[in-house]
Amino acid sequence: MFCTTPSPSISPSRSRGNATQSPFLRLPAEIRLQIYALLVLPRRPSDLIPSYEKVESSAQDSFDYDRRERGTDRASAADLSNPILLIRTIEGNRYAQRYGPNKPRGEHKRSDYTVRADRYRLRCMKTTYHCVNNPRIEDHLGILRANKQIHAEAADLLYSSYTFDFDTHVEAIIPFLNDLTPFARSCVKSMRFVKRGLAYDKEFDRAEWTSAMRYLTSSSSNIHLRRLQLGIVAGRPGANGWDRIATYQKQDFILLRDHEGMQWMQYLLELRGLQELDVSAVVEHCAPATNSMAMANFIRFSASIESGFAQYLREAVVQPVVVSVRLDSSATPSPSDGDIIKDESGRPMINDATFAQAVVRKMATPPNSDNVNLSMLPSTTKTWAESGCLGFLVLNRPFKGSRASEDLFWKR
């Protein structure tokens, strides 16, 4: 579906000529982005419905007994403001039937890899990944080959707008990202994946998790995630199996992260630049806590996933985005805490990318301004921000369910 070939090689002088001669490139950037959105983003929720044949040919997803849904059911109620692409590993036997030797469709351009296959995961088989809900934009992707500037603008919108959902198929993360160009890979901002249940973790599960996390946290991979949806398979012995369980608090995980079987957390703590983290439990049935001490620890951790563990992880890895701005003291009177910041025309300031409303929050001390990024603000805010005295805007909390950091904080 996605273009993995390099963008056209165009000399700087020719690229500048295109920008001045092309009527399209003379359009305002906001208009061009709207045109790109019509080409590379889904128009209807039905565009994101998974293909039944592709779901059937994929390796098994997680199943949440609370929500009564598998990982591929998440796109059934598609949200066009946060489109999700479901990347899944093709089941080993299906891969052999489709791409094996002497098959008419025996070639593909995606990287292949080896996984544990069959019901009991006893056999190693070669396979690859596929997207089970292509959003019907294949006919429009030719725009990525128009020229270097259009490729950069359209690819940035394409890869930054989707959430790439791998569910428990973490073995597909590295091949999928490696198949993208370095620029496209740097544009990926949102992902979802699921950690398999600790009580049932095998050595090869730990190896796949370790490899994927090392890749995502390595600076050489050029990946800059801003939003992560982390699912963790949780065990619960019956509908009321957590009622009398003493859950872990966030401070407990400072010690637990070094315990046997919890080393997988170390790689999550190396994530940098996250602005939003959603941690959820994928509930499965399990044996009672009386079966063994290991099962009792697993159940206690499971009951703590959406409370103590989620709080600990957010405080450890979510970093507010600090934007250094200049406020016009004459045009903008000193605001009060909770005021909605407005532009010159009196309209509330909105972050175009995340639909965040600018709200005043007085801060006792200026935040760290190392990661200044005015590009996250709309053009009206930039104009407003470049005049007057120095201040700060900090984006760090969801606003009306939008998909990145939201509340804007101000300090004189």
Image (tube, rainbow, N blue to C red):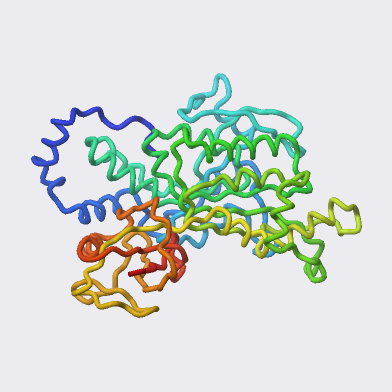
Residue 61 in picture, x, y percent from top left: 64, 48
Q: State the quadrant of the C terminus.
A: bottom left
Q: Is residue 135 visible?
A: yes
Q: Residue at x 79, y 71 (%)?
A: 243
Q: State the quadrant of the N terminus.
A: top left
The residue lying toward the viewer, choosing from 251 and 9, is 251
Residue 266 in picture, x, y percent from top left: 64, 44
Count of picture labels: 0
Q: Is residue 1 visible?
A: no
Q: Say whether residue 274 is left or right of residue 316.
A: left
Residue 410 in picture, x, y percent from top left: 36, 69
The residue lying toward the viewer, choosing from 131 and 323, is 323
- Residue 13, compared with residue 377, is above or below; it is above
The residue lying toward the viewer, choosing from 242 and 287, is 242
* Residue furthest left in the image: 21
Q: Residue at x 39, y 51 (%)?
A: 371
Q: Quadrant of residue 357?
A: bottom left
Residue 175 in picture, x, y percent from top left: 52, 33
* Residue furthest front in the image: 365
Q: Quadrant of residue 125?
A: top right
